[in-house]
Image: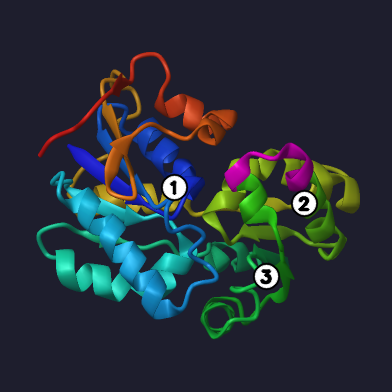
Amino acid sequence: MKIALMDSGIGLLAAAAAMRRLRPDVDLVLSSDPVGMPWGPRTPEDLTGRALGVARAAAALCPDALIIACNTASVHALPTVRAELEPAIPVIGTVPAIKPAAATRGRVAIWATPATTGSPYQRGLIRDFASGARVTEVPCPGLADAVEAADEAAIAAAVAAAAALTPADVTDVVLGCTHYELVEAPIRAALAERTGGTGPVYHGSAEAVALQALRRIGAAPEPGLPATGALTVLLSGDEGALPAAALGYAEGRLLVGEGAALGPVRG
């Protein structure tokens, strides 16, 4: 079994690590676009073109499913990628976990990139799934870039700025960018200090999209299996290695940890 994941950069690590935990035997293909990143400032048409190229590179290795592990690419490119690859390869998009966060009808903060914050897409999700909750949209300028570079000082500064915009009585926090799940620990620490006690409940999308990919191909989670899955890394279409910054995160180290095979995975 082979699952591909795509993103502009290392934001795909969270979903890839979730898949590795759920199915240690699965072969993973990580397809990113260091030549074209970041995707956020691009026009929707340009972004879709870059995303389609990254998807095609992954599809050439014949995965059983493809996860678009990027919120922005899911908004703009999901229909185009699906139109080209499905039904041969199921394509799973990433949606911010606003619905489960709002289910408690508490005080919800949505941490997202400045481009996503206040966007018609995010406002539509709030309208559809969080009408009964008090919602605060929190822009996080520079946080995704800092995570991509594994720049601890920049991460700390961006997290502190976003925490200052987060209501002190928040009960649930949506991590609305896949990069943010890689730095959940410093986010938790900053908000625990601001809100007191243990802080709010956090809602990411990594495990949900991994489970959805398994469902789409009729597979079940089996976390107890031996960690025999291989790992292939594609960088703007060329085979390569995980960037050094990826190994600064537990998710990246998990993917290349003991028992994981490294090398090309052919269809």
The magenta segment is: 148-155
Task: Please tell me how many numbered marks the rendered image carries.
Answer: 3
Q: Badge 1, how many Cα within 10 Å: few under 14, some, many 20+?
A: many
Is residue 251 found left or right of 187 in the rendered image?
left
Q: Are marks 2 and 1 in contact (CB under 8 Å)?
A: no
**Where, quadrant-wise, is the N terminus in this rendering?**
top left
x and y percentages locating residue 211 in the rendered image: 35, 48
| Tag 3 residue | 105
Work out whether 225 lies above or below 152: above
**Please, what secondary structure does the residue beneath circle 1 have?**
helix
Q: Badge 3, how many Cα within 10 Å: few under 14, some, many 20+?
A: some
- Residue at 86% of width from left, 43% of height from top? 197
Quarter of the image for residue 164 reads bottom right
| Tag 2 residue | 159
- Residue at 10% of width from left, 39% of height from top? 267
N-terminal-most mark, 3 or 1: 1
x and y percentages locating residue 85 in the rendered image: 16, 64
N-terminal-most mark, 3 or 2: 3
| Tag 1 residue | 12
Q: Residue 161 magenta-drawn?
A: no
| Mark identifier at residue 120 | none
Work out whether 81 lies above or below 237: below
Q: Amino acid at mark 1?
A: Leu
Q: Amino acid at mark 3?
A: Arg
Q: Main secondary structure of the magenta part?
A: helix
- Badge nearest the viewer, 3 or 1: 1
Q: Label 2, label 1: how many angstroms apart (C-alpha)?
A: 20 Å
Q: Label 3, label 2: how many angstroms apart (C-alpha)?
A: 25 Å
